[in-house]
Amino acid sequence: MRVLWSLMLLVNTHLALATDEVQSKGLPVAAYSVQQATGFYQFRQVTGQVVKHQEAEIGFEFSGVLESLYADQGDAVKKGQLLAKQDTQLLEIEKLELLANLDKVKAQLKLAEQDSERLLKLSKSNYSAQQQLDQNRSQISVLKAELQVLNVKLQGMDVRLGKANLKAPFDGVIAAREVSIGEVVGPGKVALRVLEQGNSEIRIGVPQGLLSDIQNTMPITVGGTVYQAQKRSDGTNLDPVSRTVQLRFSLPEDAMVFSGQMAAMTIAKKQKKKGYWVPISALTNGTRGTWQIYQIEQGHLQPTAVEVLHSDGQYAYIDGDLVNGTEILANGTHKVAANIKVDIVQSVATRGEQQ
């Protein structure tokens, strides 16, 4: 009987010790140590459009049949490069005719000048020779005038022949071709559209309240690529409808962009208000639509009401009765309650001041 009582006493002692050990252990949790920050950034995205510093719709000044095309859409071209040519056969025939008339007038002028020399000698002793000399001088004046007219016409013909060659006005790329070989093209008809290579600009309307947050260099996204764009103008006029100010930014020379592409710029505005960054998972619903977190005080959870000022999807910027270094429950708030005992088994990295 004594042995039996001894065994029962031993078992009860072990059970009591085990129970005390279980009760001394808390729920394993992850902790997050809060650090006070001076404020947070709110981000606002504005959109704009790519424009080229120079773009031109070029064509022929005179009507004619398109004989040759030396560039097509997408081709890179250099300033002065021949892009297209009209048929110039008729112009060349007209030029030959003018040259023939020019030679004819020159020959007539030479003969008239020779006659003038002979008549000049005769005029000194013969009245009739003097009259002929006057007629001859008049003829020379007429021939010289005809010669001048022909020279002007030849210059004009050379200009027209030159205008039959369409050349690139600047270094760039052919954005569009609007004509085909054999087509009659002339004034008012766009043959090619040329965009300058490089010297790309972004034009973006920025709300007046965000102008002070625009830096000289801003990241601008075009076609999925982020470029560091340089501000070119501060803007002067406020659009009465959109209430924005039009700003211009220049892109790097090697930016592979196209005129008309959409561009997006993110503006960061600093809100100067002291608070704390905490993981979204550390927040839980409080009373009457408020938010709360759980502070870890002497191994127990203490609910603390907080105000959420901002969120970026992963972290929330809060204000509340906290101090630097306070440890809070980092996650799993739906599994706990106030005042329960916890053991910190993991520490979550603290998010510092937002840059």
Image: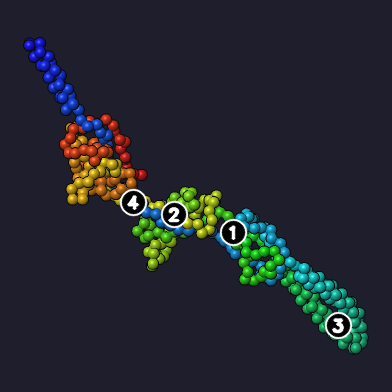
- The total of numbered circles placed on residues is 4
Callout 4: SS: strand
Q: Residue furthest bottom?
A: 127
- Please state which amino acid type lies under the numbered disc 4: Gln
Q: Residue 264 shows which numbered tag?
A: 2
Label located before the other in sequence (3 or 1): 3
Mark 3 Cα shell of 10 Å, populated few (<14), some (14-19), many (≥20):
some
Callout 3: SS: helix
Task: Identify the residue under disc 1.
Answer: 175
Label located before the other in sequence (4 or 3): 4
Task: Identify the residue under disc 4.
Answer: 42
Q: Quadrant of the C terminus?
A: top left
Residue found at x 53% / y 58%: 259
Task: Identify the residue under disc 3.
Answer: 136
Query: Can the viewer see residue 235 in this picture?
Result: no
Query: For this view, does 123 lie left or right of residue 62?
Result: right
Residue 46, image x, y percentages: 41, 56
Q: Is residue 312 above or below residue 326?
A: below
Residue found at x 72% / y 71%: 156
Which one is closest to the eye, mark 4 or mark 1? 1
Residue 351, image x, y percentages: 31, 40
* Residues at marks 4 and 3 touching, judged by CB atoms closer than 8 Å: no
